[in-house]
Image (tube, helix red, strand yellow):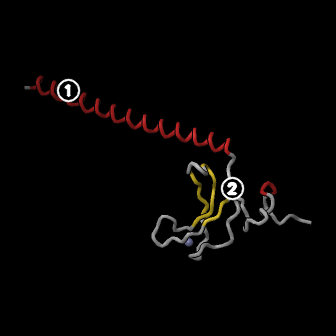
Amino acid sequence: MRNPNPNPSCGTNNPGMGESHCSHILRQTVCYCGLVPVMKTSWTEANPGRRFWGCRMYGKAQACKFFDWVDPAPEDRYKSIINGLLRKKNQAEKEKEKMFKTISCYHIIFSLLILYFAIRVLV
Ligand SMILES: [Zn+2]
């Protein structure tokens, strides 16, 4: 018998979890607005990197409360690893931002000094 699933690595639907939980298959159901839901990724401490289906209008006033997890709950070990990496990434981004501010401050001071000496030479 032929497998109706076009991607064998995808496996079958997760029993008791409704529709397909495969990222490469479009969800067939619709949200409470009647729209095809979109897959998003949670970056909360409790569910870092865990994908879910949400309303296409999420973030807008007319969005409904439709929500369904795609991935199973992450194990505590992976959760702490991902959260640790996220903290390091955020810290690195803050340091990079601070460094750029310092560099642009030096750039302004250097430009003003060149302008000052150029005026002194010309006058
Ligand atoms: Zn909706």
Neighbour class for label 1 at 10 Å: few (<14), some, many (≥20)? few
**Rendered residue at 56%/68% (across/down):** 55
> Foreground: 69 or 13?
69
Where residue 20 appears, as percent x and y from the top left, is 73, 64
- As measured in the structure, the alpha-carbon distance from the residue carrying label 1 to the one carrying label 2 is 58 Å
Per the image, the residue denoted by label 2 is: 71
Q: Are marks 1 and 2 in contact (CB under 8 Å)?
A: no
Closest to the observer, 16 or 58: 16
- SS of the residue at dot 2? loop
Image quadrant where one finds the C terminus: top left
User: Taking the image as four quarters, which one is ligand 1 found in?
Assistant: bottom right
Q: State the image quarter where residue 35 is shown.
A: bottom right
Above or below for 99 versus 2: above
Give the residue at the far right of this rendering.
Answer: 1
Q: Is residue 20 left or right of residue 96?
A: right
Q: Amino acid at mark 2?
A: Asp
Label 1 secondary element: helix
* Residue 11 x/y as whole percent: 80, 58
Name the side, left or right, on which 108 lies relative to 41: left
- Of marks 1 and 2, the one in the foreground: 2
The first of marks 1 and 2 along the sequence is 2
Q: Which residue is mark 1?
A: 113
Residue appearing at x 43%, y 34% in the figure: 95
Q: Position of residue 76 (x, y in %)?
A: 67, 44
Q: Which labelled disc corresponds to residue 20?
A: none
Within 8 Å: ligand 1 and the Cβ of disc 1? no
